[in-house]
Amino acid sequence: MKKIYLHIHRDGMTSSSHHTNDAALAPMERKLIDMYRDKDGLYTQPAEISVEREVWESHNRDRAAFHGFYADKETGNPHSVDWSHGRYNCGRCNMEQNKLCIFLKPSKDLPQRDGGVGPVNMESGSCEHFEGKRLGDSELKAFNMVDSDGYGVAKNGKGFGCPVCPYAEKRVEPDSAGRTLWCKFWATAVDEMACCKYNAAPVL
């Protein structure tokens, strides 16, 4: 990494010089946390409740937001949360129009129609690009930009969400923000109204 230093001379003229920070080029040392996993490779919830636990859970939740589209009232994109019901299905998504998806590309399961792809399953179909339906949020008609590989239809007939995901279990106690679930996939506390792209609810 090079730093540029600006020198101001007595006559008001300026000049610059370059210095290389050799320390910044060295391999970065950071702490790697090794947590206990069960036979399925999922993270086991610790029994203790502490400030330190909330700190590393917060880091893991940020990781879930960045890599898995997780969101709640303090983490990730709030527009991707179904605040009223916590039901992640096509019927509650801002990308749905007349039972068609205007965001995904056509596929075998979602063929091209006039105005989008589908029809989608309004009650139990969804994908990782869910966006809460809001009256003032306009969308591009027939955007058709993203592969539909993530689209699925939940067997439960209700859609997806943390409460119906087998990776979720009750947290020992709610955290300081009221999150009541522990996610065994991300090793963190999650909100009952939340979801992420790795939701493992059984699909048809």
Image (spheres, rainbow, N blue to C red):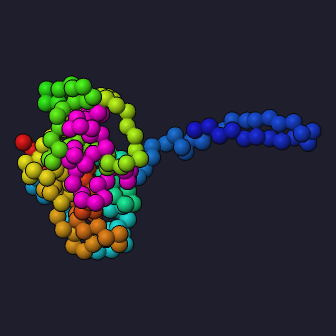
Residue 95 lies within the magenta run: yes
Rendered view: 71 above or below 203: below
Pick the residue in front: 55 or 156.
Answer: 156
Q: Is residue 184 visible?
A: no
> Magenta stretch mostly in which secondary structure?
loop
At horizontal 29% and vertical 55% (from top left) the residue drawn is 82
Q: Quadrant of residue 122?
A: top left
Say which residue appears at 62% left-offset and 37% top-offset: 2
Q: Position of residue 4 (x, y in %)?
A: 69, 38
- Rendering coords of residue 48 (x, y %): 25, 74
Is 81 in front, or is 1? 81
Percent position of residue 133, x then y: 32, 48
Q: Is residue 115 visible?
A: yes
Q: In the image, residue 109 lies at what x, y percent?
A: 13, 30
Q: Where are the magenta residues, as a range?
A: 77-106
The N terminus, quarter of image: top right
Q: Say whether residue 176 is magenta.
A: no
The reply, left or right, for residue 1 in relation to residue 124 is: right
**25 or 67, which is in the foreground?**
67
How many marks are shown on the rendered structure?
0
Q: Nearer the viewer, residue 61 or 77?
A: 77
Vertical placement of residue 74 versus 101, above or below = below
Quarter of the rendering occupied by the C terminus:
top left
Q: Is residue 30 above or below residue 57?
A: above
Residue under the point 76% across and 40% down: 6
Q: What residue appears at the point 37 percent right and 60 percent down from the top-left corner?
A: 73
Q: Residue furthest right?
A: 11
